[in-house]
Amino acid sequence: MDCEGIKRHGKDNVILETERLYLREMKQSDYQALCRILQDDETMYAYEGAFSDAEVQEWLDRQFERYRKCNFGLWSVILKETDEMIGQCGVSMQEWKEKEVLEVGYLFERRYWHRGYATEAARACKKYAFEILKADEVCTIIRDINTASQRVALRNGMIKKDTWTKHYKGVDMPHYRYVAYR
């Protein structure tokens, strides 16, 4: 999928709304909330540990670049009840076996796990990929040890399609690709 020419949707940078959440573009002011996610060792176990301050900023800058280039990326997930950023979820182009694929990605602050927020946000992002981006296929790429995220992918109507070992931080990390089709 080529992301050139995709139009930005939503007002006030709000992209999607669900029953309990809204998703909007990340802002620099989300940095501290993003640190609570990316700097938590338990949350980041599938990435081989917590990120440094510089790595968190690089992650945020990468989203800004995605918004500029493609008009989509990972978005801040805001809990309507408190207006607090509790995670990130969105669609982005990711490398898979020497090609780029459209992926629904999600990562939430640990204190918000096991409440259905990831599934709720991921379902909205899958729908966005099919209805707004007109994708024929969307996937979620998950490390083999991340069983919680695998369950979210299954609840999002995806099936395990194939595997590939990525090399990150000097570690071989087997990943599964879960796929849904329009």
Image (cartoon, rainbow, N blue to C red):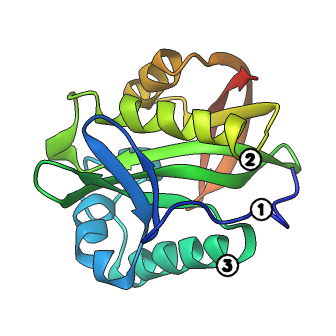
Res 181 quadrant in image? top right
**Mark-to-mark CA distance, 2 and 1:** 7 Å
Q: Earlier in the sequence, mark 2 or mark 1?
A: 1
Q: Amino acid at mark 1?
A: Ile
Query: Mark 2 or 3, which is nearer the eye?
Result: 2
Q: Amino acid at mark 3?
A: Arg
Q: Is residue 21 left or right of residue 14?
A: left
Q: Is residue 147 left or right of residue 9?
A: left
Residue visible at 18% across and 41% down in the picture: 112
Q: Secondary structure at mark 2?
A: loop
What residue did someone put label 2 on?
A: 133
Res 30 quadrant in image? bottom left
What residue did someone put label 3 on?
A: 68
Looking at the image, residue 109 lies above or below residue 156: below
**Mark-to-mark CA distance, 3 and 1:** 11 Å
What residue did someone put label 1 on?
A: 6
Residue 55 is situated, as x and y percent measured from the top left of the image, at 44, 77
Looking at the image, residue 77 lies above or below residue 30: above
Q: Are marks 2 and 1 in contact (CB under 8 Å)?
A: yes
